[in-house]
Image (spheres, rainbow, N blue to C red):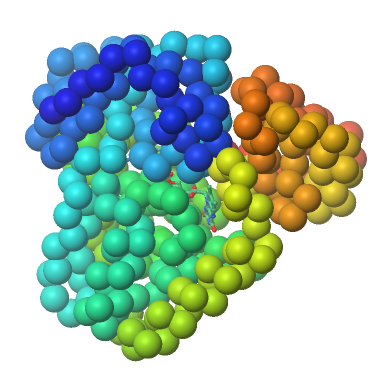
Amino acid sequence: MEIRNNVDLGKYTTFHIGGNARNFYMPESTQELISCLRTLGNEKDFYILSGGSNLLINDKKIYDNVIYCKRLNDYIIDLGEGKYHVGAAVRIQKLINKLNRDGYGGIEYLYSLPALVGGIVVMNAGRGEGYAKSISDFIERVYIVRGGEELTVEKGDCGFGFRTSVFKGSKDIVVAVDLRMEVTDSKNAELDIRRRMAEVKLYQERNKANFGSVFSCCNPRIMNIMQKLSYGRKSGVHYSSKTPNWLVNEGKGTYKQAKHLIDDVAALHKIFKKECKVEVQIWD
Ligand SMILES: Cc1cc2nc3c(=O)[nH]c(=O)nc-3n(C[C@H](O)[C@H](O)[C@H](O)COP(=O)(O)OP(=O)(O)OC[C@H]3O[C@@H](n4cnc5c(N)ncnc54)[C@H](O)[C@@H]3O)c2cc1C
């Protein structure tokens, strides 16, 4: 297993803001991960990083141990009849392409995510709430490492909800997942992907550093106000004009700016007695 030291975490997040990892572990298999955790000892604090596409990391902090899942089980095993055993490190585009080639699919809408399967399972990534579509529709069971032991968690025990699972915010590390996909015509799947990519190009500010939605639940009117108030910041962080529930980093943004803007929105929701839930995972 490769271990790097003094790694700039900003380079590993899509928001391009992050602190420093003193030890940056890159396990390539479940066994390597288990050995790594046993060396660390259970009492040691560690952070888990995959595609870094839903993370806001404090740029003033040094994190002792970061486990990077980019190489953790990079495999897709075809179990037949639409069933697949998929490692946590697999890029979602690679998985969708493979499924479609085999005549299966159902998750083409996830093609636009710069994410890995492990992060997608933990966040139960999907489409907006009204669509009621997420990766968990196709999950049978999840394989995790907890406290140095490998465990299997059946779907009913995964606590999947809108953008959430029992793994979120825990120290469980997702190492693989069993999926059962639906039969899909590969031409239709290709069209769905093209349509989705055209849609996100039109409606999302993808040319600037971002981490997707800030909130999994928020009030659109409050977001529009905050977007207008924060927009003047041309070199830092502000709410996106195209996607008011996104923060974008113009290049010189800081963790402090982003955190203030998130806290301001939460405070406004409280004042106006509206519901608001933070989606982005924050390493404070
Ligand atoms: C341009 C853009 C578009 C997006 N569009 C969508 C969308 O349409 N729908 C949607 O749901 N999300 C969207 N997102 C958000 C993001 O892609 C998802 O939340 C995704 O699931 C995060 O996966 P990741 O691999 O990047 O995880 P990371 O951001 O690295 O991690 C997310 C969280 O999961 C934990 N984690 C990561 N890997 C593991 C693991 N193997 N085991 C245990 N814990 C782990 C991390 O510690 C962190 O708390 C978008 C983001 C961007 C930048």
From the viewer's perspective, tell me whether residue 248 is left or right of residue 180. Answer: right
Is 25 located above or below residue 154 in the figure? above
Quadrant, the N terminus:
top left
From the viewer's perspective, tell me whether residue 135 is left or right of residue 175. Answer: right
Residue 42, position in %: x, y?
25, 17
Q: Quadrant of residue 199?
A: bottom right
Quadrant, the C terminus:
top right
Seen at 72% across and 53% down, the residue is 243
Q: Does the image show residue 279?
A: no
Q: Does the image show residue 241?
A: yes
Seen at 40% across and 80% down, the residue is 190
Q: How many marks?
A: 0
Seen at 49% across and 75% down, the residue is 194
Residue 168, position in %: x, y?
44, 39
Observer-nearest of 183 and 56 = 56
Residue 82, position in %: x, y?
22, 76
Seen at 77% across and 34% down, the residue is 234
Is 267 located above or below residue 144 in the figure? above
Residue 282, position in %: x, y?
55, 29
Observer-nearest of 20 and 141 = 20
Q: Quadrant of residue 255?
A: top right
